[in-house]
Each structure stands twice: as C-alpha cells, then as structure tokens.
Amino acid sequence: MTNPIPDVRNAEVIFITGSNTTEGHPVIGAFVRQAIENGTKLIVADPVRIPLADVADVYMQIKPGTSLALSNGLLNVIFAEGLENREYIRENTSGIEELREIVKKYTPEYTSKITGVPAEDIIKVARMYATKKSAILYSMGITQHVNGTNNVMSLSNLALVTGNLGRPGCGVNPLRGQNNVQGACDMGALPVVFTGYQAVANPDVVKKFEEAWGVSLSSTPGLTVTTTIPAILEDKVKMLYILGENPMVSDPDSHHCAEALKKAFLVVQDIFLNETTEYADVVLPAACFAEKDGVFANSERRVQRVRKAVNRKGDSRDDWAIIMELMNRLGYKCNYDRAEDIFNEIASVTPSYGGITYARIEENEGICWPCPTKDHPGTAILHVGKPANGKGVLKALEWVPSPEAQLPEYPIQLTTNRLIYHYHSLTMCARSEAISKHAPSKFVEINEEDAKALGIEQGATIKISSKRGSITASALVSDRVARGVAAMPFHWADGANVLSDSEALDPISKIPGLKHIGVKIEKA
C-alpha cells in the first residue's frame, strides 16, 4: 500500500475495485466503514454485489475481466472535461500524450457496452474521483486475470493523472490476500529479485549477495509458481519444496497440478496435513505463528514483531530452523541462534530494511519500510513530493477480452471469491466446528433469471463445467450477480480451481485468470 491503513479515513472518496474488503480484509473494511460514517464517499466496482455496495454512493456491477476498460472510460471523461491535474502530470509523469490518445475511443457509451456499467455512472464516478482527495483500494479481483498487470497499471494511471498520490487520503493501495504476503515478497520470495526487490539480473546486486553469503549465485531469474508446475511435467524441474502452501486447492487446474505433484520429488513443510501433503514424499512439521518468534510485514509495509505465545507441538520446528539444518546438511555451513540474528542479516543486505531493528520495532509498534538508516522514522506514505523513481510512467493500455469470455459452449462467466468465515484453503479453518457450521460446503451463486432458465431451484445440486473439468456444488440463487455471471468461493478442494486455466497467464506476472472462468451450468 502506498498509504497507511487508517489513512483511508482521510480520504474524501474511496474507490474499491476487485476487493470484497469487509469479508476478505475485515480490519481494513472496518476503517472504510468508519470513513463512510465520517462523510467519505464510496465507489465500488465488482461483478458481485458485495456488502459495501449497499452503502456505496455509486456501485458499478462490472462484467468480469473488464476493469481495464472501466479505467480507460474514467480517464476519457477526466480528459474530456479537463479534470486532470495538469501541473502534476507535467512535473511528475511521462507518457501522457500516448495515454490521451488511446483512451479517446473509451467514451462512456463505448465503455458501458464493454463493462455493463451505465454511461451516466461512469461520468459520475470520473468526476467524483478526479475532483476529490481520493484513495484506490484493490485486491485479487484486479490482479488474478490474464491482463492483471495492465489492470494495476490502469489504476496507477488514474492516480497519476489526477495527482492522487503521495498525499494523505490518496494513493493506490493493494490489499494483500494473506498474512505476511508482503513480508514474503520483501524477503525475495519472487523469482526475479533478492530481498527488498533487488534484481537478480543486476550484476552489482548479485556481487553484493555473493560477498555476504560466500557463494557464487546465478543471475538468471527463476520460475514462478504457475510456470513451475508445467516445468515439472516437461522434466525441467525434478524436486519441489513447498512451504505453507496448498496448491491442490489454490493453484489453477487442479488435475494438471496433481499430475505434476505426482511426478516430482515433493517436500511439504506445513503445520497440518492437507490435500497437497497427500502427494508428498517427505513432510516437514513446521511451527505455527503463535509458536514462534520473529516479524511480519503487513499490507501497509509495516514490519511488526511476532512473539511466541505457546510451546511447539511434537517434533515441529520453526521454519528457519528447518531450513538452517537443511542448508548445513547440504554443505552450506550456517548457524543462527534465534530469529533476530536472521533479521539483522536481512537489514544488512536490504536497503529498505537497513534502519529497522527489533529494539526500534518495540519502541514504535512497527516501522514502515523504506527505512534506510537507524535514525530514519520509516515511510508511512510513499511518493511524497514526487514519485520515488522521479517520474510516474503512464501506460497507454488497450483492453482485450479474456479468452474465457469467448467460448460459446461455456457462456457463464464464473468469478471466484472468499468468505469471511474461511481463510484460505481450509487447512486451518475447517478444523473449527463453529466456523464450518457457517459455510460447511461449496456452493455457486447464480443469477435468478439464469436459474429459472436452467430449471435450477435454490439449494439444488448443480454441475459446473469448464474446458478443464467439472465439479458439483449446491446452487445459491441470488440477485447479487448479474445475468450471465456466477460466483464461487474457492476455499474447497474439488472446487473452483478444478475449473480454472493453468495455461493462459498474464505475460508479465504469470498470474492465471482465477477470477474469470468460462463455464456452463446444468442440473446435476
């Protein structure tokens, strides 16, 4: 997030798109509700009528996969009515002429045909966002598409063109999907970077880490999760080591994933057995968050302390202790006595963490990176004064329909979502009887008119099929989704991700289109 979580209360307008904030991020959702009570205007764009839509000043029920077109339509109105911040654009951006040119055709009427949003609402939202102190909140409803990177850049375009960046109550704020996802990325859990987003392909960066660790390192970027699975089937990857992940539920095309897990030598490090450990050759028992000491970095880039609350069970160990022993057995000698030793090493090779220590975190209830020196207070708001790289790059982006929207035999557009009762792949939540009572089994939300046309009644067992396979689930007949659209929580095995596509990926991030799947629905 470019801005702190509580800062949404300083916004005059909040634009939420691709995020069911009160269910997927209930703490942040509480701050949004506080802002609304204090007079902040709310705009919501989502294929599903989420709870926040009921209190929104404008709710835009967009068709799945059309977020980029909506952004371009808003920009069309902003430019046509002279609502852009010309001084900010001149001093702080590049690429404005190309952007102006590409959005010319995205008139409110043209954009309405693509998105399903009435033209008058597009005009109203553009005026609201451009003329007020406005914050954007988004999540995986924006990113988990085959054009997800472009979707994000289109939101950046909106902020840059209106100068809604680097100030309180503004910003472009991605809401992380799980605890410490931000911290994992900060630590280099991406195939193209070391810690702190230092590029693997940069020779100077590689040399620094070689000197710090006393080994030779590759400068070739690695594979993403979604490219690793096909690489196994192509004999390019022989062993897979999974930590705290359940790809048999969360990865696209579950049958394809299962083939790869069967073929690889599979090591799974987790706190419970799950659908993925069924394929494991070795399971390493890890400790849960309450059993260990360390730090997490949350969505607002705040590095916070985690303290041991209970003793570990059985033979489980801290993740770092398991990894350290493996490194020693593989011939790389290292010895850390505690998590703090590792954090100090991180700070020594990571400029954005350079000034953070356990002692400083204790004093400040966490510190937001970048924090380069020990006398630096941390950075609550990014891009203050001007974009961090000097110029914010405006991207001229054309909307292209998803392949999943062009399959006559699969006419229903299925999007996936989360429930407040369940966290992720049920590895933990399903062990709670009380939680499971609220949402005990998988279901698909379908439009009332679609249900009537298909002869499907409330609660009936239905069959949902895509090009990848078929599943069954109960029908939730609803007015929360538009005709031709369906929604399904992804939490259950043998569920939504049996249907999703593992081959069509975003060309830059390699993210699959989990939020947009062409399906057909029929009686079971």
Image: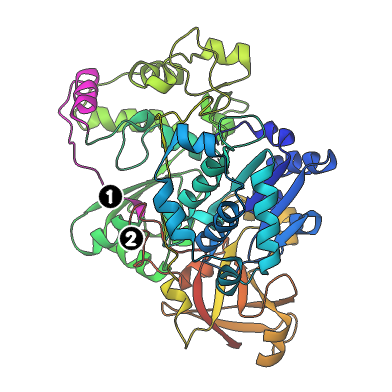
In the rendered structure, find residue 223 and report the number of the disc placed on it.
Answer: 1
- Vertically, is 191 above or below 485? above
Front-lying residue, 22 or 285: 22
Q: Amino acid at mark 1?
A: Leu
Tag 2's secondary structure? helix
Front-lying residue, 261 or 56: 56
Q: Quadrant of the C terminus?
A: bottom right
Region in magenta: 202-225
Q: Is residue 289 visible?
A: yes
Q: Residue at 63% of width from left, 19% of height from top?
A: 365
Q: Write down the quadrant of residue 26 in the picture.
A: top right
Left or right, 211 with reference to 393: left
> Quick check: marks 1 and 2 in contact, CB under 8 Å?
no
Q: Residue at 30% of width from left, 63% of height from top?
A: 260
Q: Write down the quadrant of residue 505 in the picture.
A: bottom left
Q: Amino acid at mark 2?
A: Leu
Question: Is residue 475 magenta-colored?
Answer: no
Front-lying residue, 224 or 249: 224
Front-lying residue, 170 or 259: 170
Left or right, 446 with reference to 377: right
Which residue is under mark 2? 261
In the rendered structure, find residue 370 and report the number of the disc placed on it.
Answer: none
